[in-house]
Image (cartoon, helix red, strand yellow):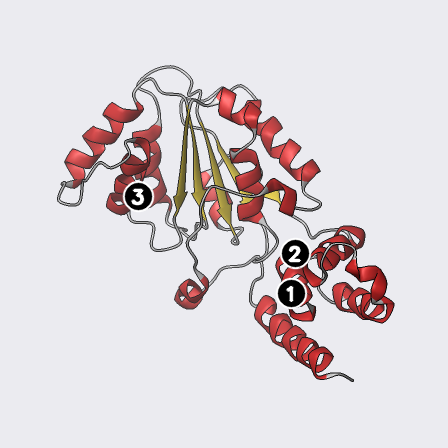
Amino acid sequence: MSPKIKDINRRLGELATEWKSFDLRQYSDNRHVFRRETISFVHSSDVIGRDEDKENIISMLMKPSEDQNVPVIPIVGLGGLGKTTLAQLAFNDDRVTSLFPLKIWICVSDEFDLSRLLKLIIQSVNKGERCDDSTLDALQARLRSLLNDKKFLLVLDDVWNENKAKWVELRNLLRPTDGFSPSKIIVTTRSLNVAPIMSSIPPYILKGLPLEDCLTLFTKWAFNDGDERHYPNLIRIGEEIVKKCKGVPLAVRTLGSLLF
């Protein structure tokens, strides 16, 4: 067995151990070890196998609201499944951009702190605004002023908050003063406990990719375009590796890049 294949098998074992902890359950405080900053941009051509999920989320975004509170769409799934990627795909779709004149992307990850979130939202809406020294009361007033009569899409990525009181504080600042809210919120989370706290609708449970899509993704990351036909033995090894990835795109991509 070549050193590279041995390295892949070793890394596969490490990843399998890591992903055992990324289950849909309640997490301890050390969960923040896995946090990472995210952005709204995505190369859609790099994403494989999420077209149907994207259309489902967009359909939910386009559904008229019948609630004064801003409707929340929770996307729930294991770490590495592509929750953030799915939110990015919907966020950047032309139909969504036409529907929501104002789009805001916030990577939450850390503690669900109201003051911090208000600052991030304000700075996203009004680029360059400095509000470091603002009081919580001033931040609340400023947010209400900026969002007044605005139709917006807010993405709260990588949420861990299971304290409903904290969410209600933010929710009340986001809803309109009267009438149904035309805006929407997408929340991504690994925890099933978060979804019912933030939304009254069932969560969108993101599932693993089918084997065929995983093989396509693996080939994309393991070889230069067209080179895979020169390495039939590596393709067979890749198929066995992909089966062990359980449909998790991050695992497939990571191991594919090791092979390359």
The spot of residue 22 in percent (x, y) is 56, 63
236 lies left or right of 47:
right
Say whether disc 2 or disc 1 marks the residue closer to the N-terminus: 2
Residue 220: x and y in percent read 71, 55
Task: Tell me the residue at 60%/66% (across/down).
Answer: 19
**Reading the chain from its start, which is encountered first: label 2 or label 3?**
3
Viewer-nearest of labels 3 and 1? 1
Judging from the image, what secondary structure is the residue with disc 1 in? Answer: helix
The image position of residue 69, as x and y in percent, is: 40, 27
Amino acid beneath label 1: Ser
Looking at the rendered image, the quarter that the C terminus falls into is bottom right
Left or right placement of residue 217 versus residue 187 in this view: right
The crowd level at tag 2 (other Cα within 10 Å; few <14, some 14-19, many 20+) is many
Which mark, residue 117?
Answer: 3
Q: Which of the numbered marks, if any, corresponds to residue 257? A: 1
In the displayed structure, 51 sits above or below 100; it is: below
| Quarter where residue 94 is shown | top right
**Crowding at mark 3 (Cα within 10 Å: few <14, some 14-19, many 20+):** some
Residue drawn at x 65%, y 65% is: 257
Which one is earlier in the sequence, the residue at label 3 or at label 1?
3
Which residue is nearer to you in this view: 65 or 145?
Answer: 145
- In the rendered view, would you say 181 is above or below 157? above
Residue underneath mark 2:
249
Q: Residue at x 57, y 70 (%)?
A: 18
